[in-house]
């Protein structure tokens, strides 16, 4: 998706419920609007903003209009994003339900940006059905969150694609606040096309082999006191493993073709290697 080729609609969601640490959401809002206002393609970008947002605000916004980018700035936790309820208190959004909501609207939805701490697990689920998902791995400082938004929307407004915009956001953080807490990831959904006619391949039944692999991996992680397998999900052409290693969450993806071609021991060695990197 390039701005020079289409009109882009962005839904920006802000939430800072009662009882949570204050976030500088008003400044982030202003920075995003400034980036768009100063950009080359400002007339081709429409922004809808939801402040003090609830899950119903997001759901209704998606019913009312089509969006290409959804941006959520809020607190996050290891069990889900924290939005507001009807009286402004904290509400932890069910992870699978939010992923299914966004997947329902893709396409046209192309990118979900989770500018929230510990959003990698939630993002991993969303990425199974949305082309691009941007997540934060662990805590993130207010300053870094704001500067990432600045760089990201500077690039979007300049007509660059999502991958370039993500990298520009990271560059902006490194240039503006190099010592800030910031660790991000761009999760990309793989296309699944058949070599003959471009039609989607049907997922093969690999559940038995995957179940055996998950059991051995969990046993190995626990035996070495390094972690455990939190969950695994089947995507369209891959399996996503969510593991916790030394109190740090990781999402590892293995394609169906790898699972078919490699032995369980080879797959186990591969995952253990990834988990140490």
Image (spheres, rainbow, N blue to C red):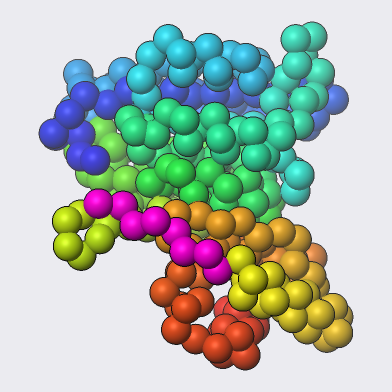
134 to the left or right of 218: left
Indicate the position of residue 177 as horizontal and vertical percent values: 52, 52
Indicate the position of residue 211 as horizontal and vertical percent values: 68, 70
Q: Nearer the viewer, residue 192 or 131?
A: 192
Indicate the position of residue 235 as horizontal and vertical percent values: 50, 55
Range covered by the magenta-colored residues: 199-206
- Examine the rendering and report whether any part of residue 221 can be seen: no
- Image quadrant in which you'd find residue 192: bottom left
Characterize the magenta stretch by its predominant secondary structure: loop
Q: Nearer the viewer, residue 176 or 252?
A: 252
The N terminus - image quarter: top left
250 to the left or right of 110: right
- Residue located 26% across and 45% down the image: 161
- Image quadrant in which you'd find residue 227: bottom right
- Image quadrant in which you'd find residue 222: bottom right
Where 181 falls versus 158 (above or below)? below
- Residue located 44% across and 84% down the image: 261
Where 54 falls versus 142 (above or below)? above
- Residue located 53% across and 64% down the image: 205
Indicate the position of residue 46 as horizontal and vertical percent values: 31, 18
Magenta highlight on residue 230: no
Q: Nearer the viewer, residue 26 or 183?
A: 183
């Amino acid at each position: 998706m390039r701005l020079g080729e289409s009109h882009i609609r962005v839904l920006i969601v802000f939430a800072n419920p009662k009882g949570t640490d204050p976030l500088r959401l008003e400044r982030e809002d202003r920075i995003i609007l400034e980036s768009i206002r100063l950009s080359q393609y400002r007339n081709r970008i429409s922004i809808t903003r939801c402040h003090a947002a609830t899950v119903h605000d997001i759901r209704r916004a998606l019913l009312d209009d089509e969006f290409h980018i959804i941006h959520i700035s809020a607190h996050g936790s290891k069990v889900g994003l924290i939005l507001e309820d009807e009286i402004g208190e904290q509400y932890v959004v069910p992870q699978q339900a939010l992923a299914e909501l966004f997947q329902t609207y893709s396409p046209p939805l192309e990118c979900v940006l989770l500018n929230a701490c510990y959003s990698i697990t939630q993002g991993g689920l969303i990425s199974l059905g949305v082309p691009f998902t941007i997540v934060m791995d662990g805590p993130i400082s207010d300053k870094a969150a704001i500067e990432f938004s600045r760089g990201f929307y500077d690039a979007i407004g300049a007509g660059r694609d999502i991958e370039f915009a993500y990298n520009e956001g990271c560059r902006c953080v490194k240039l503006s606040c190099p010592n800030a807490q910031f660790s991000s990831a761009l999760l990309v959904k793989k296309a699944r096309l058949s070599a003959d006619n471009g039609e989607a391949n049907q997922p093969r039944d690999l559940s038995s082999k995957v179940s055996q692999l998950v059991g051995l991996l969990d046993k190995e992680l626990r035996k070495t006191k390094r972690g455990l397998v939190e969950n695994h999900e089947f995507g369209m052409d891959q399996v996503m493993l969510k593991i916790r290693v030394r109190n740090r969450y990781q999402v590892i993806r293995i394609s169906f073709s790898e699972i078919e071609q490699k032995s369980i021991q080879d797959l186990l060695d591969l995952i253990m290697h990834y988990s140490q990197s």
